[in-house]
Amino acid sequence: MENSKEAAHRTVRIGTMDTIVAALIFALGALVVYESYRLGSGWDENGPQAGYFPFYIGLLVCISSAVVFVQGLLRFKSDVRVFVRQDQFGQVLVILLPSAVYVLGIQLIGIYVPSAVFIGLFMKIVGKYSWLRSTVICLAVSVIAFLLFEVWFKIPLPKGPFETLIGY
């Protein structure tokens, strides 16, 4: 069994994540402030300009994230709590990576085929269902979604070559 020092090197501490997330949120707030200022963040003869409210919200986000960033730096050495263990992060990746591939698949080949593949593989791999049950359910969900949105509600969703092949 490994000792706790070796395990600690393969984990991320809460203080590290606090400072990283605070910096990212600060950057987002700064972008909002910049764009709001560019649009007009003051008053004109008709009242507040388009960027007035977002400017101050962005400023508040920047101030709040700066406070969290400084707090994270001040307790960086003393806070040794673990944000996520390696095994926990692996469980997150089991969901995150296929979801990212699914979103990319929607962009490339439409929503219905990637949805069927996504549901079917998740049922088989994560849910441990049989291939038969996974296949029947994933195809049924995709067909029902297609009928619901495309045929009955007439709401077009992203389509790919398969939908073109069947005339939609």
Image (cartoon, rainbow, N blue to C red):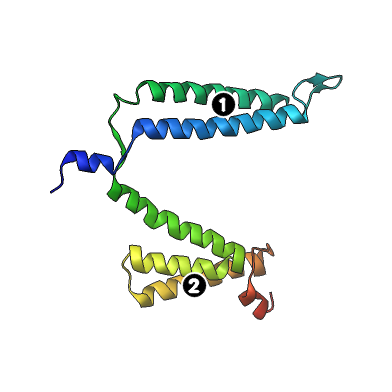
**Front disc: 1 or 2:** 1
Q: Is residue 86 left or right of residue 41?
A: left
Q: Look at the numbered discs 1 and 2 and tell me whether their residues touch, using CB distance below 8 Å.
A: no
Vertical placement of 124 versus 50: above or below? below
Corner quadrant of residue 54:
top right
Label 1, residues with CA under 10 Å away: few <14, some 14-19, many ≥20: many
* Residue depicted at x 36% and y 30%: 15
Q: Is residue 3 left or right of residue 119?
A: left
Give the numbered dot on residue 28.
none
Residue 59 appears in the picture as rendered:
yes
The residue that disc 1 covers is 61
* Residue depicted at x 68% and y 29%: 34
Vertical placement of 152 versus 37: above or below? below
Label 2, residues with CA under 10 Å away: few <14, some 14-19, many ≥20: few
Q: Is residue 47 left or right of residue 156?
A: right
Q: Is residue 10 left or right of residue 50?
A: left
Give the numbered dot on residue 140.
2
Tell me where residue 95 appears, x and y as whole percent: 40, 56
